[in-house]
Image (spheres, helix red, strand yellow):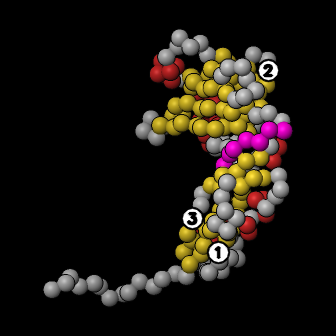
Amino acid sequence: MNSISASMRTTTAKAKQLRRSGIIPCVIYGSGLKESLSIQIDQATAQHLKRMKRNGSLVDIQVDGKTYHTLIKDLEYNNLLDEVVHISFLMLQSGKKVNSVADIVLLNKDKVQGILEQIQMQIPHAAEPEYLLDTVAIDLDGRPAGTVILVEDIPEFVSDKIELHTDLSSIVLRINDKKRADPRPMRAAE
């Protein structure tokens, strides 16, 4: 889903009342707008966005016949109620850099022959809209114990189109040897 439909929201409606009726309050903001747009989407669309997208994902929003190119800046979720509470979208402008995050997705974790330690889950960066990254996949198949992957080892981050907000020598993940547990039971100190 790269595009969703939304409708304008009246500011007199209370957010709690909207959520009870299956409507999620949202906002589109950014320097390209004279003022922020208060919009609303249905709970099913919001849940689908949560499953398929993440903070930093690009989404086109159609409101009253106009399309806004946006970035999900903040998707608030209530785990207890299992519902999306609010979504903030940042309107993008061509040629203007935007701060975002790229989630690190690990593939083939089950094939790792050691203890996997992921230090960074997201990499903050800035880029023009067409160069933004929302996910970067790292395939762990065939990676031996002792492997250390730094930010600079991930090709997507070594680009003159992306301005990283983290050190290139930062560790993203490492694979340690499996430690054998001592089979003897521990004794209480006497």
Q: Position of residue 60 (x, y in %)?
A: 76, 32
Which one is earlier in the sequence, the residue at label 2 or at label 3? 2
Q: Can you see residue 100?
A: yes
> Closer to the observer: label 2 or label 3?
3
Which one is earlier in the sequence, the residue at label 1 or at label 3? 3
Mark 1 lies on residue: 148
The amino acid type of the residue labelled 2 equals Lys
Residue 80 among those drawn in magenta: no
Taking depth in this image into account, of 103 and 143 the one nearest to the observer is 103
Image height of 160 relative to 146, above or below: above
- The residue shown at (66%, 16%) is 8
What secondary structure is found at the residue carrying circle 1? strand
Image height of 65 relative to 183, above or below: above
- The residue shown at (62%, 32%) is 88
Alpha carbon distance from label 2 to label 3: 41 Å
The amino acid type of the residue labelled 3 equals Ile
What secondary structure is found at the residue carrying circle 2? strand
In the displayed structure image, the side of residue 3 where residue 111 appears, left or right: left
In the displayed structure image, the side of residue 53 where residue 84 appears, left or right: left
Q: Position of residue 178 (x, y in %)?
A: 52, 81
Residue 26: which quarter of the image? Answer: top right
Q: Residues within 10 Å of mark 3 (few under 14, many from 20)?
A: few
Residue 98 among those drawn in magenta: yes
Residue 168: which quarter of the image? Answer: bottom right
Q: Position of residue 33 (x, y in %)?
A: 73, 23
Alpha carbon distance from label 2 to label 1: 47 Å
CB under 8 Å between discs 2 and 3: no
Taking depth in this image into account, of 69 and 163 the one nearest to the observer is 163
Query: The magenta stretch spans which residues?
Result: 95-102
Which one is earlier in the sequence, the residue at label 2 or at label 1? 2
- Which numbered tag is attached to residue 66? 2
